[in-house]
Amino acid sequence: MAQVTVLRAGLMMTVQDAGRAGFLRFGVSGSGPMDPEALRMANALVGNDPEAAALEFAYVGGVLRFADDRMVAVCAAAPDLKIDGARALPWRSHLLRAGQELSVGATPGSVWGYVAVSGGIATPPVLGARSTHLRTGIGGLDGRALQDGDDLPLGAGDIGPVRVLRNPWRVRGGAIRVVMGPQDDYFSPEILRRFLNGPYAATNQRDRMALILDGPDLPAVRGHDIVSDGTLAGSIQVPGSGRPMVLMADRQTTGGYPKIATVTGIDLPRLAQMPTGRRFRFQAVPQDRAEDLLIAARTAFRHALAEVGAP
């Protein structure tokens, strides 16, 4: 049977694909990757369909062994990437022979990384996707984080050519852009200025559900309770503590705290990847500007995908 064995599991290592769509109204989170473009790039490097499932991890990737020949790519800041003890490079594919081991060390300067395997991870789909949602225990392997000794089935995959990312596509610096609201009217003009002046930093209180920020408190003049309404990936909720939290891939589908702003689609993966303690500021942009930025970013990403090829 074609499979990959997890000899040593990476932190928060789960099976993730593009996520499950169409179930938010039933209270089912879309889940999916914390950094969707990194997952798509990993799949492109091994010749997979963009919807194929791969492995996501945080901070350190662990050790994997393959039962048959596979193309494998690691998309992460992974300077300690090795194949059978020999150093290898991320952001390109490698041919691993049956029995070889892939070791993915720490990811300094970022948080989330991806390991794609030709053929994809072939765990059974749940509600149309293989993505793991840890809090409800669905998808992936028994709805849980991976553990040492787990065996994961693989789909049928061809041994294709080595592919390399030629053109990095993302801007890594600058403010995190947000669209204000929908409940920014719960906060006084002074507090809104405080929010935008910052600075804030990512804390170690983070997982696939949310990221709590350290920085100026944000008391709400109209109170911190609202009638629960829908949330988005990137919604910035402010509970009674006044400490903002950014909702992520495994967020709850509704929430009862006021949302001061929403992180733009272009900058949410960058915030998710921000190391603990790194300071940043928010910048408010109009919705139409956020849409233009996202269109431009997707165009740049399509060009990067088109330029993936042989070294």
Image: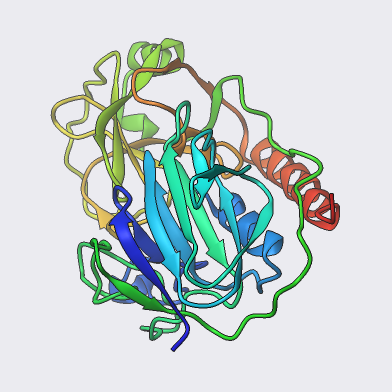
Residue visible at 79% across and 48% down in the picture: 304
Q: Quadrant of the N terminus?
A: bottom left
| Occupied quadrant, residue 258 | top left
Q: Is residue 205 above or below residue 44?
A: above
Most extreme residue toward the left is 240
In this view, the residue in front, 268 or 146, is: 146
Q: Is residue 283 above or below residue 208?
A: above
Q: Is residue 166 left or right of residue 75?
A: right
Q: Position of residue 308 (x, y in %)?
A: 80, 54
Q: Is residue 151 above or below residue 168?
A: below
Q: Position of residue 46 (x, y in %)?
A: 67, 65
Q: Position of residue 112 (x, y in %)?
A: 44, 43
Residue visible at 53% across and 77% down in the picture: 68
Q: How is the image coloured?
A: rainbow
Q: Disc count in the image?
A: 0
Residue 181 is at least partly visible in this image: no
